Image (tube, rainbow, N blue to C red):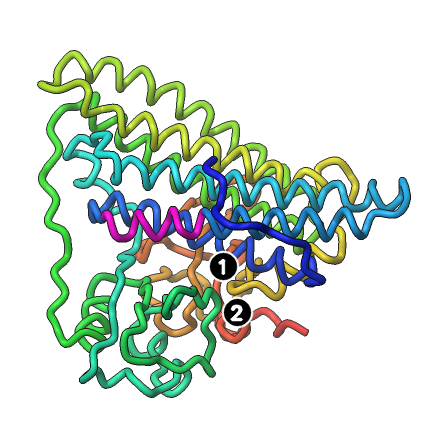
Amino acid sequence: MEPASGDVEYEPRSVKEVLAEMKDTAELLIDLSFSAVLHGSDDIAEEVLALEGKMDVLQLQARMSLLMAARSPEDAEELAPVLGVVGAAEKIADAAGDIAKVVLEDIGLPQAMRATLPEAIESLVHARISDSSSLAGRTLGALNLETETGVRVIAIHRGGDWILNPDRATDLRVDDRLLLRGSEDGVAEVYEQATGRKYRPPDPPEAGDTDLERAVDSIVLMKNMSELAVDLAYGSILFDSTDVAEEVVELEAEVDALQSRFEAWTLQAAAHVDDPVSLRGLMHLANSAEVISDAAVEISEGVLRGLGTHPVVEYAVQESDEVIVRITVTHGSRFDDTTLGEERVETETGMRIIAVRRPPDDWVISPGPETDVHAGDVLLAKGTRAGAERLQELSGEERMD
């Protein structure tokens, strides 16, 4: 980890506020780092390193505040899991920075990597608002982009600062850089509205070598599983659920096993490619995904060890940019015996279904439009609180309090 520039001093700032910002920043960093790889973008990679430096400051502020709060052995016991959450978010930021350096330092990636990534991540695109943009001067609530296009503005870079939790009241201004996430068609529409230019998606080449394809596919799966592990880890805190925390441990073990298979396939592929050095970047991506899954276990450590969830962490998760909810599909609801695509979940609610759990123990990780859903299935979803309430209505569950 590279030290952040400038002095950091204690500020009487709420630990809850700092933790919420750390959670949002860590999740944004994962998205940005893999987007930088997909697009081969030095600009996005530089943003990752800038945010990594911001995370360094946030974790120091959080540690200072926690030290000020610990006045007895009982306080120390209660706050120890909070320190684990702080350290885990910092590790995620460091892993994202390592991914960004694959781009900035031209470490090398086989073309097969960029051929596969578009299938693994939603389009994540920067769009600068031009002088003539119809978006300038309007709020996100007035534009209603999520409902109209299925695209969410997950962050705004304004001047030298990031707005990590834009909401309906957030206004858009000329020269704002929006970070857009959604389907490629939806992103293309919003990108053109913001910039006045056509969006040109990457046109990756086809992959060829079988061992290399397996290695790349394993990284994509590691990425998906490690991201899911982080979301589940925060979910375990929110629901103080040992069951959910144990799923995080299972996912981390799966990522470890995938990494072992990945190493074997990469070594085999090295014998068949013209430039084996071009595979170095794959090693970096795999290592970073494994670090992220390890950090997820650290986030849920307090729950796993029976220490419970400290209220400050629970409140931070609740007040962060995106809420995480578990929703059980009921008989006769719109989701019973249908697919996620048929019900246009993301377009109608703005929520992303990050996993589907089928009784008793089957998981569908990063489900797509073709994923079928039945009564009794548990949907793990991530998005705004208003979107979560809408999703609950569609699933047949009672609304949240």
**87 or 242, which lies in front?**
87
Which residue lies under the disc numbered 1? 381
Q: Mark 1 or mark 2: which comes first in sequence? A: 1
Q: Position of residue 326 (x, y in %)?
A: 57, 58
Q: Position of residue 206 (x, y in %)?
A: 10, 37
Q: Residue furthest front?
A: 7
Which residue lies under the disc numbered 2? 388
Q: Amino acid at mark 2?
A: Ala
In the picture, measured across the screen, residue 390 lies left or right of residue 205, that is: right
Q: Secondary structure at mark 1?
A: strand
Q: Residues within 10 Å of mark 2 (few under 14, many from 20)?
A: many
Residue 35 located within the stretch drawn in magenta: no
Rendered view: 281 above or below 51: above
Q: Amino acid at mark 1?
A: Ala
**274 or 269, which lies in front?**
274
Q: Is residue 213 visible?
A: yes
| Residue in view at x 61 percent, y 40 percent | 87
* 3D distance between C-alphas at marks 1 and 2: 8 Å
Q: Main secondary structure of the magenta part?
A: helix
Q: Is residue 244 visible?
A: no
| Residue in view at x 12 percent, y 20 percent | 275
**Residue interval drawn in magenta:** 42-52
Q: Are marks 1 and 2 in contact (CB under 8 Å)?
A: yes
| Residue in view at x 58 percent, y 40 percent | 88
Q: Secondary structure at mark 2?
A: helix
| Residue in view at x 31 percent, y 15 percent | 264
In the picture, measured across the screen, residue 377 lies left or right of residue 306, that is: left
Question: Where the C terminus falls, by quadrant?
Answer: bottom right
Residue 50 located within the stretch drawn in magenta: yes
**7 or 124, which lies in front?**
7
